[in-house]
């Protein structure tokens, strides 16, 4: 990439020199006569060809530089644990998993509970759309709407601007946020129209201020978007095939921040605190992890996940995630801040507040009762007509 950039710089200098000579020659030709004019015209022809070649070389080197630059991931924060998916470090554990054995019954998984409640229908989802699709029915649909409304209410109270964003985006937005690198296999592409279906509203929120200069005194800018999300889950064959834990389409409330680069680490911790507040409000036991380098993705310099305890799996599973992308996305999307006379890239951060299906999984399994009913946390009750219990429609 450095070699290509050097070619871009040198070819740019060469192009400018030739263009300057060409302009000077253009001023001399009208004044010349005879053999001198013929020689100048001959030289002008040579220069025209040279300028054209230098311009093509400059464009080719610039495109090669850009292509290679887009393959580079973000610089990783020095405190991130080194390793693969299992090499994370646990920052804290909040809440205690229920001891179902002490309560005298075996917990049911979310799909069995969802079917008893008349809330989840994966058979008809598969019939209509294939595997990893589902219907939320009856109280399941109401539960999603309750979660979304409660999450948006929390975000709005915290100062976020609520947003509804496009699910289809141009290649520039998808590429600029870093989702056409190693994550490309999970992205749905509509070739006929050259649109991408977003896997997260982070893409649309990052693209919102694409090619803009924001005044420093407007920062931080915080948005909270509700949107559908689409993922191929190409690398997950055979994983989490039961129920709605890992699906191709789901809804999510996503937080997104634009801040000055020097404020990004503090903002990252704020986003994490908002995620923790949400999960504590749902009264779910969870742990917070510092994700290892090999599991970061291309755009994040650092990422924290909140993993809720899933009783029937006997382990913590990711429910929310927040990433500090520092200047990486802003540089690729040409988003800058004006600070006095200085114009420079800013920093972007994102954080899941509520990924609906996984949150429903955690809620049903952690708050179930022996008869298949499910206790409703107080934070959701205003959005569920005040009900304190979801009750089975069939035994």
Image: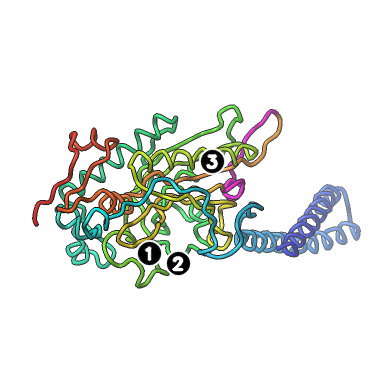
The answer to whether residue 44 is above or below residue 274 is below
Query: Residue 246 bears which disc, if any?
Result: none
In the picture as drawn, the residue positioned furthest to the bottom comes out as: 238
Upstream in the sequence, badge 2 or badge 1?
Answer: 2
Q: CA distance from mark 1 to mark 3?
A: 30 Å
Q: Is residue 310 above or below residue 207?
A: below
Q: Residue at x 35, y 36 (%)?
A: 152
Is disc 1 surrounded by few (<14), some (14 to 19) or many (20+) residues within 10 Å?
some
Sooner in the amino-acid sequence: mark 1 or mark 3 = 1
Q: Is residue 326 magenta?
A: yes
State which quadrant residue 262 falls in.
Answer: top right
Evaluate if marks 2 and 1 touch, with contact meaning CB atoms under 8 Å apart: yes
Q: Mark 3 and mark 2 in contact (Cβ < 8 Å)?
A: no
Residue that mark 3 sits on: 269
Crowding near the residue tagged with mark 2, few <14, some 14–19, many ≥20 C-alpha atoms within 10 Å: some
Earlier-in-chain disc, 2 versus 3:
2
Q: Classify mark 3: helix, strand or loop.
A: helix
Magenta segment: does it hold 287? no
Q: In the displayed structure, would residue 381 be above or below residue 33?
A: above
Q: Quadrant of residue 197?
A: bottom left
- Could you give the CA–CA distance between mark 2 and mark 1, rounded to whole angstroms? 7 Å
**Residue beneath label 1, please?**
232
- Name the front one of labels 1 and 3: 3
Q: Which residue, given by chain and number where applicable, does mark 2 sit on?
A: 185
Badge 1 vs badge 3, beta-carbon distance below 8 Å = no
């Amino acid at each position: 990439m450095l070699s290509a950039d050097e070619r871009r710089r040198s070819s740019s200098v060469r192009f400018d020199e030739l263009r300057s000579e060409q302009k000077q020659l253009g001023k001399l030709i009208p004044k010349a006569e005879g053999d001198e004019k013929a020689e100048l015209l001959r030289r002008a022809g040579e220069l025209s060809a040279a300028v054209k070649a230098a311009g093509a070389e400059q464009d080719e080197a610039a495109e090669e530089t850009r292509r290679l630059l887009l393959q580079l991931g973000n610089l990783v924060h020095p405190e991130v644990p080194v390793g693969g998916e299992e090499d994370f470090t646990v920052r804290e554990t909040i809440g205690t998993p229920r001891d179902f054995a002490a309560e005298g019954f075996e917990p049911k998984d979310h799909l069995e509970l969802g079917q008893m409640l008349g809330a989840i229908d994966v058979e008809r989802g598969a019939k209509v759309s294939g595997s990893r699709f589902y219907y939320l029915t009856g109280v399941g649909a109401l539960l999603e709407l309750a979660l979304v409304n409660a999450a948006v209410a929390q975000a709005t109270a915290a100062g976020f601007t609520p947003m509804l964003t496009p699910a289809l985006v141009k290649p520039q937005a998808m590429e600029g946020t870093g989702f056409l690198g190693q994550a490309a296999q999970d992205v749905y592409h509509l070739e006929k129209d050259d649109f991408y279906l977003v896997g997260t509203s982070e893409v649309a929120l990052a693209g919102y201020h694409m090619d803009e200069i924001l005044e420093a005194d407007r920062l931080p800018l915080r948005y909270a978007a509700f949107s559908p999300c689409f993922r191929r889950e190409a690398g997950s064959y055979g994983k989490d095939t039961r129920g709605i834990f890992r699906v191709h389409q789901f809804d999510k409330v996503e937080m997104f921040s634009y801040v000055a680069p020097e404020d990004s680490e503090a903002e990252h911790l704020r986003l994490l605190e908002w995620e923790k507040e949400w999960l504590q409000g749902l009264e779910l036991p969870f742990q917070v992890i510092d994700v290892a380098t090999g599991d970061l993705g291309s755009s994040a310099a650092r990422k924290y996940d909140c993993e809720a305890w899933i009783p029937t799996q006997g382990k913590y599973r990711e429910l929310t995630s927040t990433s500090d992308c520092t200047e990486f996305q802003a540089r690729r999307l040409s988003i800058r801040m004006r600070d006095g006379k200085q114009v420079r890239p800013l920093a972007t951060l994102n954080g899941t507040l509520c990924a609906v299906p996984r949150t429903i999984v955690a809620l049903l399994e952690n708050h179930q009762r022996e008869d298949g009913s499910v206790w409703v946390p107080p934070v959701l009750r205003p959005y569920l007509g005040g009900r304190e219990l979801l009750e089975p429609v069939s035994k």
